[in-house]
């Protein structure tokens, strides 16, 4: 990690700490401080990831192995054994949904529901806490969504590795 990146991370952590403690009277210090270490509720993660999968063409297309617009009727299950959902709002979730067929590339929309393509895989996500929003249900914004693993039958995909072994 470059020194600059480290400085930014430390600066970011310091900023979070300051926000957490600002405007606390002694009586509610604990409650206030805990807000900074709050994790996004699972229901919020599921809703935000599911909603964004409807329009995340790049992620959905990798999961499906073909070009699609997104996924609909998405079920999102948070994966606990890999990376626990942590205070940074990052984690992994298994997603499964029906492909929203792309009409752009001359592909026709599949009318026959039995031919609907169900795509599944694991995504990594990141949610950011909006500090000025007291309602935990509305306080999280999805900032990153990437493919971690593809489980759709017949689709093979390897996560691009940042370490190339020759």
Image (cartoon, grey):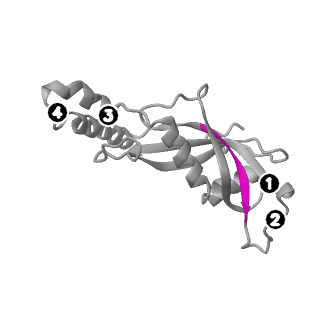
Residue 110: which numbered mark, if any?
Answer: 2
Q: Residues within 10 Å of mark 1 (few under 14, many from 20)?
A: some
Whole-angstrom CA distance, mark 2 to mark 1, is: 9 Å
Q: Where residue 81 sits in the image (x, y, percent)?
A: 61, 25
Query: Upstream in the sequence, badge 2 or badge 4?
Result: 4
Residue mark closest to the camera, 3 vs 4:
4
The residue depicted at 60 percent of the width and 57 percent of the height is 56
Is the stretch drawn in magenta largely helix, strand or loop?
strand
**22 relative position to 68: left or right:** left
Extreme residue toward the left, this view: 25
At x 80% / y 70%, what residue is drawn? Answer: 107
Give the labeled residue for mark 3: 36
Q: Which residue is mark 4?
A: 24
- Above or below: residue 71 compared with residue 104: above
Report how far apart the C-alphas of labels 2 and 4 lie in the structure.
56 Å
> Which span of residues is magenta-colored?
93-101
| Residue at x 66%, y 45% (from the top left corner) | 160
- Mark 2 vs mark 1: which is more N-terminal? 2
Q: Is residue 14 left or right of residue 54?
A: left
Which callout, 1 or 4, points at the residue further toward the start of the chain?
4
The residue indicated by pointer 1 is 117
Q: Secondary structure at mark 3?
A: helix
**Element type at marker 2?**
loop
Residue 91, image x, y percentages: 54, 36
Quadrant where the C terminus is found in the figure: top right
Q: Residues within 10 Å of mark 3 (few under 14, many from 20)?
A: some
Q: Which quadrant of the rendered structure holds the N terminus?
A: top left
Q: Nearer the viewer, mark 3 or mark 1?
A: 1
Q: Position of residue 131 (x, y in %)?
A: 30, 44
Which comes sooner in the sequence, label 3 or label 1?
3
How far apart, in angstroms, are the residues tagged by discs 3 and 4?
13 Å
Q: Where is 85 relative to 64, above or below?
A: above
């Amino acid at each position: 990690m470059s020194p600059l990146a480290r400085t930014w991370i430390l600066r970011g952590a310091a900023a979070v700490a300051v926000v957490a403690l600002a405007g606390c009277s002694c009586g509610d210090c604990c409650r206030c401080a805990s807000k900074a270490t709050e994790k996004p509720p699972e229901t919020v993660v599921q809703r935000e990831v599911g909603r964004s999968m409807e329009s995340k063409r790049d992620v959905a297309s990798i999961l499906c192995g073909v070009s699609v617009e997104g996924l609909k009727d998405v079920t999102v299950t948070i994966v606990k054994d890999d990376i626990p959902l942590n205070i940074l709002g990052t984690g992994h979730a298994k997603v499964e949904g029906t492909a929203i067929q792309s009409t752009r590339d001359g592909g026709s929309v599949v009318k026959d529901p039995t031919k609907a393509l169900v795509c599944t895989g694991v995504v990594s996500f990141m949610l950011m806490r909006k500090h000025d929003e007291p309602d935990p249900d509305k306080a999280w914004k999805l900032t990153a969504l990437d493919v971690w693993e593809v489980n759709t039958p017949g689709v093979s995909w390897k996560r691009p590795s940042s370490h190339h072994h020759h």
